[in-house]
Amino acid sequence: MVTDEQLVEASLQGSAAAFNEIVERYQERLLRFLLARSASRADAEDAIQDTFISAHRYLYSFNPRWRFSTWLYRIALRNIASQPQRYLPDAEVELADGTDPLQICLVASDHENVWITAKRVLSDDAYSAMWLRYVEDMSVKEVARTLNKSVSWAKVTLLRGRRRLKLELADSTTAAARSESYG
Amino acid sequence: MDEFEKRLKRDAQGIDADISPQLASRIEASLRSVERIESLRQKGSATSNLWWASSLTGLAAAAAVIALLNWNRPDPEPVLPEQTAFQVVPDAREYLQQIQGRLPLRAETADFRHGLEDELVKLQADFEKARENVNRDIDFTF
């Protein structure tokens, strides 16, 4: 299988097909990640489009010392942060019921999606750190680099986020069991 | 990977992130336009580079021609404006040498003795006149 870095190299040589392959590989992954950080699905799609344009334009500046996904997610986060009029990070703005893009895009399941819980109880940065570490399989160092934070921040945030989520999930499981026993 | 991490991964896959054909075509179109802009920019920079290269070559050629033309030419005599001013008045010695044979020069012996004696007589006369004036004035006074 051709690696991301090889595709980047081919793109730099002028291969449009190689960059299209990169787009194919990452568009769904990026959309999943950005849905939680956008005010709407349309905003997330705009951010993806901007991310690929920026990546294509500045591909020459990519440092192969790091994984390509690290670089791409960093661009995506920067793009989503540059939509202040639509996306308000950490804002105390409650989305109306049925308008949360992440909630809308969930596949029907018998339990609450853990990422919905994560979005509810974690900060934006902690959510991103958890996603990059456990979904994108980035190392702690790569998570720190993508979020432009220190490695120690990433370690502490991941530990706390994990603990908080586990606690939240345990509480919800207990509550569900209690309601079943009463029911 | 523990159960919790598996669940995080599984639930992430549970988020529907199908790329609509509209979004796919939007991304493709925007990338194509970026490629077109980039190629135009590269062409522009290539034209600009060509212009600079031709200008520099022209300048270098002109400098080489000028250097070749001036290679064996002797240095011009320095022009002193003061010398021109001196040349208007001919040298006096040369002028005398030129006119020596043409003009007759008559030399006479100078006799200055008469002049001094005349001066002495005039001085004595003036002295005598002054003495008479003084005597007359004394007579008038007393």
Image: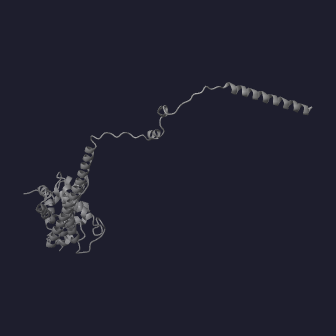
Q: Is residue A59 above or below residue B68?
A: below
Q: Residue at x 34, y 40 (%)?
A: B76
Q: State the residue in front, A150 or B102.
A: B102
In the displayed structure image, the side of residue A144 where residue B85 appears, left or right: right
Q: Is residue B92 left or right of residue A160?
A: right
**Up-down: is B92 above or below A31?**
above
For image coordinates 16% across by 54% down, the residue present is A67
Q: Relative to A8, is A95 on the left or the right?
A: right
Q: Nearer the viewer, residue B46 or A91?
A: B46
The quarter holding residue A19 reads: bottom left
Res. A155 in view:
no
Q: Position of residue B9 (x, y in %)?
A: 14, 62
Q: Position of residue A56 (x, y in %)?
A: 18, 61
Q: Could you tell me residue B78's position as x and y percent?
A: 38, 39
Look at the image and tell me whether residue B112 can be seen: yes
Q: Quadrant of the C terminus of chain A?
A: bottom left
Tell me the quarter of the image containing the N terminus of chain A.
Answer: bottom left
The picture quadrant where one finds residue A27 is bottom left
